[in-house]
Image: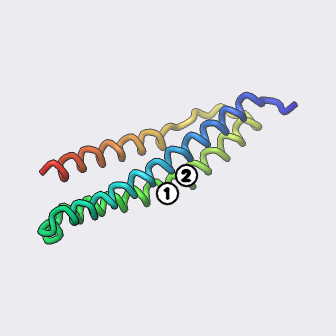
Amino acid sequence: MRPNLREHLANERTFLAWLRTSIAIIAFGFVIDKFSLYLRYLDPSLSAKSGSLKVSLVGTGLLWAGTLVIPVVLWRFLKEQRDIDQPTATKSKNWTIIAIAILLTVVGVYLSLTVGS
């Protein structure tokens, strides 16, 4: 049996949860991008406005953000795996969690202001 098996399994669960989150961010970006097309279909005069374009840019940005999360999460998974095998007195940093939370909050506020007006 592998030493520190529980820690390795917890690290793998965390990795898979982050992958699931990145897929959800990509899917959310896709939905927002398609929603901008739906807005243009409902109101043809909206294509002249920049509101629909802004929503489309947010959707595309979320697609890229979700895609960029994957290598960051892979790097963190491999780093934690190495630290489990070779314990050091390091503190785990939560900057990825904080960055994603801030990004999604800003996107949510922006979308509520853009679509609402």
Which residue in the rendered view is the most extreme toward the bottom? Answer: 48
Towards the viewer: 17 or 2: 17
Q: Tag 2: Cα neighbours inside 10 Å, few (<14), some, or many (≥20)?
A: few
Q: Are marks 1 and 2 in contact (CB under 8 Å)?
A: yes
Towards the viewer: 48 or 103: 48
**Looking at the picture, does residue 110 appear above or below residue 14?**
below
Q: Is residue 116 left or right of residue 30?
A: left
- Element type at mark 2: helix
Q: Is residue 54 left or right of residue 70?
A: left
The N terminus is located in which quarter?
top right
The image's mark for residue 44 is none
For the residue marked with disc 2, what is the amino acid?
Val
Residue highlighted by disc 2: 72
Residue highlighted by disc 1: 68
- Element type at mark 1: helix
Towards the viewer: 41 or 106: 41
Q: Real-space Cα distance between discs 1 and 2?
A: 7 Å
For the residue marked with disc 1, what is the amino acid?
Leu
Among the 4 quarters of the image, the one containing residue 48:
bottom left
